[in-house]
Amino acid sequence: MKKTIELPDRRLLLLLPSAFMTAVAVGLIGLGMLFILKDAYGATPVTVAWFASISSLAYFVGCISFRPLAHRIKAASSMAFMNAASALLLVGHLLFRGLASAFLVYGLIGLFTALFWPRLMGWLTSGIEGAALSKATGAFSMSWSAGSAIAPYLAGLLAERGLFVPVYAAAAIFALNWSFLSIGRRISPSPSPSPAPEAAAGRGRHAFFSKRRRRGEASVSAAAEAAPQRASQRASQGASQRASQRASQRASQRASQRASQRASQRASQRASQRASQRASQRASQGASQREDRSTPLRYPAWIGVFLIYAFVAVFFNIFPLYARDVLGFSEATIGFVLLIRAAAMSFGFWLFGRLSFWQFRPALIPAALIFALALDLAFIAIRSPLGFCLGLAAAGLVQAALYGASIFYGASGAPDRDSRVTVHESLLTVGQILGTLIAGLMYQLLSWPYVFVGVGTIMALGLGGQIAVIRRGR
């Protein structure tokens, strides 16, 4: 139990700051590149939607393609590579600017991001269950969501000072995170190596023969000094005394041999019992780790995270264009509105990570999605910054609930958590792609209210499927 509680705490010292920095960098280029595409490259809303979808699609492909690497490359090495590659790709785009370069760089960053988030979450949740699992995932979610919260507002402020300034900042943060991961994995404490068995055995044999040699030399010296005395004693003593000494020596030798044999037998039995107990404990631990005790609630939770990301993708990728071009919001105001959503989501992660009433209560999963559907319809009429802040704050809380449920139910009782995390990440990515494409098409071909009509239709269909899965599981 001690290992189960302390090990994740040590991991958090490395994983939480790294997750925060990666979330900030990804958020900077996420919003910053939208303004670059619109102002520098003249992209339409559909082009912007495809641009955002390219990154998400590449991330989805990476989650599937890079899955075998989880058993070959260490998580720290994989995460460090992602940050180094992303920094170099952004520098390349700054040197060779253009729409094609933006698509290529953003797609490759999305691909390499699959080397970061699944590996981080698999490393974080390894070996923990129950309350410890909920707290660890809550702390992680709070960390990356805090980075996602400040990133849009920071991107808006930087974009007002220069169109490409958010890209410079993101490249610097990726490079800083690479340095942090590279140094952090080297200075982490490791146990001192034990001496080699051959060397230990050699030292033991040397000490044994040295003791025997010293004993032999001492016995030879003592025999030489006592030779005249023994001769005179043998001459004076009779045959009866010699017989008595021999009998006494034999008795003491037999007693000593028996005591030595008993002691060695007891030590051998104890060592054998300890070895068998250790082997039995290791076998039982390995069997429990391989045993699949997954909950079927992971399926409705996965549907929920898919649909909530289809909903919030509207605000990630299309809302900034509508808010600036139609409603007249500044870049900083847009960033602040998106900050409210991410801040509420971060608070939700903190809250749900410390509460347990929602765990293994199936009815709460569709209840959260019903609330999200009501918010979707309410956004049709919202036009003011305050209204968007309030609506997105509520959406952030729902997103935190469904995201946390997907991680918790997916990892709970699972023997291979890297695979479950891959499913989780893949589903939210596909949901984000779907929501972005629907929003882009509806906004360009029809108008802003139809964006939420299209997304709401998908959510209603998914809600029906979610309820059917829960009823079948009962």
Image: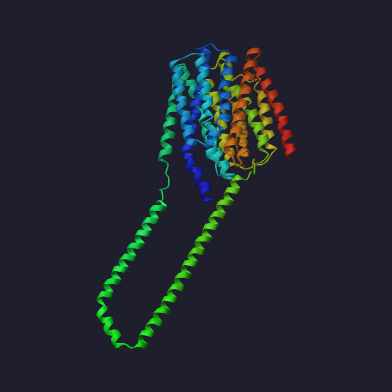
* For residue 412, above or below residue 427: below
Q: Position of residue 217 (x, y in %)?
A: 29, 68
Res. 361 visible in picture: yes
* For residue 397, above or below residue 97: below
Frontmost residue, 355 versus 89: 89
Q: Residue at x 46, y 26 (%)?
A: 85
Frontmost residue, 364 versus 233: 233
| Quadrant in the picture for residue 180 | top left
Query: For the C terminus, which image quadrant?
Result: top right
| Quadrant in the picture for residue 260 | bottom left
Q: Residue at x 57, y 29 (%)?
A: 65
Q: Residue at x 58, y 26 (%)?
A: 61
Q: Position of residue 170 (x, y in %)?
A: 46, 24
Q: How is the image coloured?
A: rainbow
Q: Position of residue 125 (x, y in %)?
A: 55, 40
Number of marks drawn: 0
On screen, residue 203 versus residue 460, left or right, reads: left
* For residue 397, above or below residue 152: below
Res. 30 visible in picture: no
Residue most toward the top?
A: 42
Q: Residue at x 29, y 70 (%)?
A: 218
Frontmost residue, 98 versus 28: 98
Q: Position of residue 130 (x, y in %)?
A: 60, 45
